[in-house]
Image (cartoon, rainbow, N blue to C red):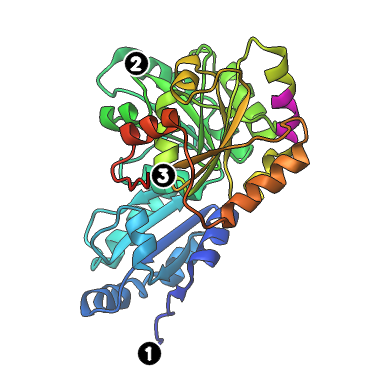
Amino acid sequence: MELPDEIEEVNAKVLESLIDETEYVAVLFYKNDSASEEVLKDLEEIDDDADKSGISFVKISDEVLALEFGLETLPALLYYRNKVPLLYDGNLHDEKLVLNWLEAHKDLDADVIEDISSNILPALIDNTTFLAVLFYDKNDDKSQTTLLELEAIDDDASKHGIPFVKISDLEVASDYGITELPELVYFEKKIPNFYQGDLSNEEEVLNWLIHQKESDEIEDVTNKVLAQMIKTSDFLAVLFYDSASNTSQTITEELERIDDDCDQHGIPLVKIDDSQLESLYGIKNPPALAFYKKQVPKFYTGDLANEEQVLQWLVEQMNVEEIEDVSSAVLQQMIKNTDFLSILF
């Protein structure tokens, strides 16, 4: 009697590479308990069949990573098609049903934008370098029309390394400051960029997405998105600027030369043109650069035109262990936006 093959065990780093390099990947998230062992035993019966269908089948025991994907109950099966995960919600003990589901979803129309849930989106943003997300209302005619237009470029975006997904969740849209649907957001290394053009012109949308991926521009963010990034990022560099100012434009161009370097050091760099927010921070003459470390801002006092000096300062701030001195204006903003705050007067 021929024994079934064992599903290959991977770690988080190997899984990330596999998802990046492989078109179809089935991932069983499990833990060391009897329920997982039984499911593993059943699914190992179809490991060879999945492989013959061009579907890599792996397993991972990483409860922290599972929680990042909103998987609170294990075992759970995620199926990646071109980097986009689908959650299997059927019976994991029925291996033939699982195999049929994997093969059926493998052959879905390539020009259908994948619908994802609210618990999958954050993990997808965190773990995907480039990502296009259409926020839409499934009960709205305008959203449905836009969806039909954009599905014509879904495959093209994927060929350029930009997975395209959609989500119909008003609460999640609100978290990003989106008040009118549909809305297209391009995420690069977790940083959102909102499309301002005509969503019915799919060629224009595709060209915009490709341009965003290939350009080295510092991402422009809104006030609400910035507030969310400050809360969720350990380190964040923010350029407060005035788009109507020549000085701001010059400084922006200088700092765009170190955007990639900042990213390599784990420091997202964004910019914002918001005079009201600048006033609240006590910024009278933009441009000004702030480095946020665990929500606490520190302003750069050197020459912003010297991008190498700026980069060195930003990297140094990551390792500085001292209580930050803040102005009264900054303190008021922190009290307003921070859930918990200790202040030494």
Q: Position of residue 111 (x, y in %)?
A: 48, 32
Q: Nearer the viewer, mark 1 or mark 3?
A: 3
> Where are the magenta residues, as a range?
251-257
Instruction: Tell me if residue 261 can be seen.
Output: no
**Amino acid on which the number 2 mark rests in the picture:** Glu
Disc 3 versus disc 2: nearer the observer: 3
Answer with left or right where residue 173 lies relative to residue 255. left
According to the image, label 2 marks what residue? 180
Which residue position is annotated with label 1?
1
Q: Amino acid at mark 1?
A: Met
Query: With respect to residue 71, does 301 lie above or below?
Result: above
**The image quarter in which residue 175 lies:** top left
Above or below: residue 150 compared with residue 319? above
232 or 124: nearer the eye?
A: 232
**Residue 109 in the image: x percent, y percent?**
45, 37
- Packing grade of label 2 (10 A; few <14, some 14-19, many >=20) is few
Q: Nearer the viewer, residue 148 or 272?
A: 272
Q: Earlier in the sequence, mark 3 or mark 2?
A: 2
Q: Quadrant of the N terminus?
A: bottom left
